[in-house]
Amino acid sequence: MGVIAVAMAACSPAPPPLQADRLWVGEHIITFDDAHADATAVAIEGERIVWVGRREDWRGDARETVELGDRALLPGFIDAHGHLSFSARTANLANVASPPVGAVGDIASLQSILRSYIGERGIAPGEWVVGIGYDDSLIEEQRHPHRDDLDAVSDAHPIALIHVSGHLATANSMALELAGISKDTPDPPGGVIRRRAGGEPNGVLEETATEAVRFTVMGGGDLSAADIHAALDVYASHGITTVQDGAASVAELERFAEVADTDGLALDLEVYLAAMDPEFDMPEGLALGEYQNRVKLGGVKMFLDGSPQGKTAYLSEPYFVPPPGLDAEYRGYPMVPQDFVDAQVARFAGAGVPMLVHCNGDAAAEMLLDALDKAAESAPLGDHRTVMIHAQTVREDQIDRMAALGVVPSYFSAHTFYWGDWHRDSVLGPERARRISPTRSTLARNMPFTVHNDAPVVPPDMIRLVWATTNRLTRSGQVLGEAQRLDTLEALRAVTANAAYQSFEECCKGTLTPGKQADLVVLSRNPLSMPAAELLDLEVVETVSRGATVFRALN
């Protein structure tokens, strides 16, 4: 019997060779899969990776073979936190950011840019003029533009500027009037209307106080398909294959689904719905955690505090230099009370709904951790993977609590470059500033974590993000927190394998593994073979999403 079986096996036909649309071959393939750490070839067919291994072991047929040469192949980058709808809505606004994003250096240059914008666009008197990205920490005068500064640009147009953090705004007199903000308007819960002596608004609005202006300016109109596609093209140019909208409305989710059904999307989109209303409930008829035409409802998003660079984040210790007019004990403030956080966390955790929770200050982080502790007393949390968004000032004891509770921190580590000097000299002081985005402390505890750009707060430039995470250089060229630096491999893992885990997608994304989605990025050089200081020299050569090239550099 055994002899017959062997003979039959010898006569059986060999399995057909693998078929592949493309086979990438080269010495610089970074898989983030230990089983294929020495790979020199990756094959894809359709939307999937079908084979990974040594080039000499490939026995299949490929319609196209791509020789990488000195270039590197990696899993596609994953946007661990950002705002696609906000990016799409603001793409055509006046750019009033400072370098390297814009050209504003002082109030005068900001005014000049706004005047040019009005003239070039032919904006008629009475029509809104909206700018995005002004940064009081980088303006020469070291202050927010006030209503008088904007009135000097035009008193015939309502003008509103959104702060680079997205958490503050400033408006001229006509804009304030149209938004219904006057001397008699009280500060809303979770927000502040900054005022002159005597109580008249000076134009600067914090947190929830910005909503009257923001909703007047951007609240009503549909997202255009053209703007959505244009924003996705920007993401693709930075090697990103999965994009996040981290605080969308139900209407925006429906608009994304409509555009996806009609036009198709070039990239995967994961949407988290803003859940700041106590009455908010998940919409019916939507499958949580499943892609439909490349759009996935990922869960909900909550905001517990504001911005450290805007000095509205909720800290346990006072700001190093408080905002003008506030006393030395000022610590920022929460956007919502603890009982709201407790109730929402218990409700969503109990229902298995993933949560993104914005906590910039360590006092806000404490609110989330306390709420999770309380929720766990009632029922096991399970594999909830609650993401603490930004987590910039979390303390060592809080990282221990996060590890115990299964919280995934997503660090805004681009801050070390964009606002590192400001954090050290004005926001937090030297000791606390050197610990912002404590990635090394988190890695030492073997915790999964991610890093992000929070676009459009800063551009979705993944190369600069990895460079900032590894070098931690400020604008002035000083190292901010050498002890928290990561090596390049771990920084890249935070935007690939770890980012897939954060979103419960480790089964299909984040590594170059057979069976996973064919999301790839080709870089001009191997980032692991170059000094971290030179990472900004890297270029994205090609981005492949679900097997299709969605970006290719012209050169």
Image (tube, grey):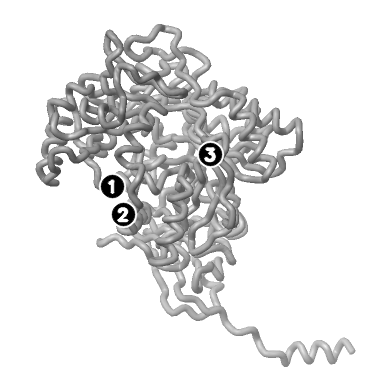
**Residue type, mark 1 in image:** Ala
Residue 275 - label = 3
User: Element under label 1?
Assistant: loop
In the image, what residue occupies the spot 70% across and 28% down? 374
Gap in angstroms between the C-alphas marked 1 and 3: 25 Å
For mark 2, does the 10 Å Cα neighbourhood hold few (<14), some (14 to 19), or many (20 or more) residues? some
Q: Helix or strand or loop: what does disc 2 sit on?
A: helix
Q: Are marks 1 and 2 in contact (CB under 8 Å)?
A: yes
Residue 409 appears in the figure: no
The quadrant holding residue 289 is bottom right
The structure residue drawn at horizontal position 37% and vertical position 44%, both measured from the top left corner, is 86
- Disc 1: which residue: 91
159 vs 293, left or right, is: left
> How many C-alpha atoms fall within 10 Å of the one at disc 1: few (<14), some, or many (≥20)?
some
Query: Which of 469/234 is in front?
Result: 234
Amino acid type, residue under disc 2 in the picture? Asp
Residue 51 vs 286, above or below: the answer is below
Using the image, tell me which numbered label, if any, was put on residue 520.
Answer: none
* Camera-nearest label, 1 or 3: 3
Which comes sooner in the sequence, label 1 or label 3?
A: 1
User: Mark 2 or mark 3, which has the lower sequence index?
Assistant: 2
Image quarter of the C terminus: bottom left
Which residue is denoted by mark 2 in the rendering?
227
Q: Neighbour class for label 3 at 10 Å: few (<14), some, many (≥20)?
A: many
Write the residue at 69% across / 29% down: 373
Q: Position of residue 382 (x, y in %)?
A: 72, 42
Q: Cα distance, mark 1 to mark 2?
A: 7 Å
**Could you tell me residue 351's position as x and y percent?**
68, 44
Kindly identify the residue that appears in the image at 33 percent across and 43 percent down. Answer: 536
Name which residue type carries label 3. Answer: Ala
Q: Quadrant of the N terminus?
A: bottom right
Q: Is residue 133 visible?
A: yes
